[in-house]
Image (tube, rainbow, N blue to C red):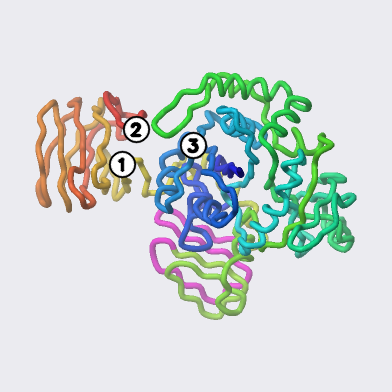
Amino acid sequence: MIIPVILSGGAGTRLWPLSRELYPKQLLPLVGEQTMLQDTVLRLNGLAGLGAPLVVCNDAHRFMVAEQLRQVGQAAERVILEPLGRNTAPAVAVAALQATADGADPLLLVLPADHVIRDAAALCAAIEGGVPAAEDGALLTFGIVPTAPETGYGYIRAGAPQRSAHPPAPAIFDVAEFVEKPDLATAETYVAGGDYYWNSGMFLFRASTYLAELETHAPQMLAACRQAWQGRVADLDFTRLDAVAFASCPANSIDYAVMEKTARAAVIPLAAGWSDVGSWAALWEVGVEEGSGNVCQGDVVEVDCANSYLYGGSRLVAGIGLQDVVVVETADAVLVAAKDRVQDVKRVVERLKEQQREEYLLHKRVNRPWGAYEGLDTGDGYLVKRITVTPGASLSLQRHQHRAEHWVVVRGVAEVTCENVVQTLSANQSIYIPLGDKHRLANPGDTILEIIEVQTGAILSEDDIERFDDVYGR
């Protein structure tokens, strides 16, 4: 059996302002109708012997991950929550421990959740072709056939072939070496030589083989992961690792911890329209051109623009005479950048953090397991939000020390609990929640509940929530 291990722990700040720390790129529909996480799972449909995926993600993203998988009928076997990021090697280690917990020893197909692959059939063919070698103990990585002398990727140099390529089986080579991101002249020699491939960060190997190699080459890491796994706690459909043990784990990638040291590393060349979408320029490269080299998404009008990426998220974006420019508009931020400077987006994010501005962290619309809220207006002593609650969902039983709230039902039916008194409100009805009163909002109906919330008080912060009961375990 092949168990997909989907790595969804990244923050994705290189695609700010669309991607935010609490809403990273893998959870966004950047290149189609589905999010990148959903595409990662769906492109494996039809792969023989495929089991339910294991997803490793950031604790803050857990409900969005679970909901997005549910939306495409791809519920994960288990979502493992990382207390903090420790790079890919520990993430895969805890997934391997999960996969072998019942005595099984499946193949693990390790896939980052934020990659674009245009030719899913080519990927599946390469995976199926690599199964025999992985079952025999090889640690396989998929090397992308380079289409240009790219300086933003690491490379893998292929060594001797492990066996002849007889279609449909792919060629499999020993890994001669992993090399760091090269300068342009070096990258040109790599591409011309024909035996170098981009390092994709995708792998196929037996769970036990990976754990054995980790024991040999990074025993301290494996010991910490075992301790974190043994101290795990079930929380709904999630597995929470022991935070103290996981924090003691060294942070390292699979490449550095295992692949560069093992004698079992092998590479399968893959030409499948792959991109890690690491910048707005990369997203422009994989986008659908609309003439003159422009890629436009959302409500966009362009006049005499060329080789530009224009994104309208919440309103009309009009571009005139732009060339090699990226324009990205969201409800609370606009990015305008030269296409060859988009790697510096991270400097903007760093400044926002230094200034303690929330725009680096989240959007105006914030998703919650029960629905979402969106800030509409704020001023001295007041804050106005639009809150939507999905059918059958409820917020926690809570109270606030610094604010009172006034709720007006816009549509749907609201069940409001305030100091043990339960009321049902419909459209155009309202209720006042005094400061310090325990209260809960629920949607007992079968349609979306939408309310307008007006907060008043000296401190208006999401930190001012004291929870007494919460179905989501927060």
Q: Percent x, y for residue 342?
A: 63, 57
Q: Residue at x 81, y 49 (%)?
A: 156
Residue in the foreground of this view, choosing between 331 and 144: 144
Name the magenta segment's main secondary structure.
strand
Residue in the foreground of this view, choosing between 54 and 321: 54
For this view, does 454 lie left or right of residue 258?
Answer: left
Q: Residue at x 85, y 49 (%)?
A: 162
Q: According to the image, label 3 marks what residue? A: 79
Give the Cα separation between the discs numbered 3 and 2: 14 Å
Kind of residue indicated by mark 1: Trp
Classify the position of the C terminus by image quarter: top left
Q: Residue at x 58, y 67 (%)?
A: 287
Kindly check if marks 2 and 1 are in contact, taking CB atoms under 8 A apart as contact: yes
Q: Which residues are magenta?
A: 313-337
Give the Cα separation between the discs numbered 2 and 1: 9 Å
Quarter-wise, where is residue 312 in the image? bottom left
For the residue carrying disc 1, how many other residues have a C-alpha within 10 Å: few (<14), some (14-19), or many (20+)?
Answer: many
As helix, strand or loop, the secondary structure at mark 2 comes to loop
**In the rendered image of this protein, does residue 269 appear above or below residue 8?**
below
Q: Percent x, y for residue 233?
A: 46, 23
Residue 387 visible in the displayed image? no
Residue 370's label in the rendered image is 1
**Which marked residue is nearer to the observer: mark 3 or mark 2?**
3
Residue 174 visible in the displayed image? yes
For the residue carrying disc 2, how many other residues have a C-alpha within 10 Å: few (<14), some (14-19), or many (20+)?
Answer: few
Q: According to the image, label 2 marks what residue? A: 472
Kindly check if marks 3 and 1 are in contact, taking CB atoms under 8 A apart as contact: no
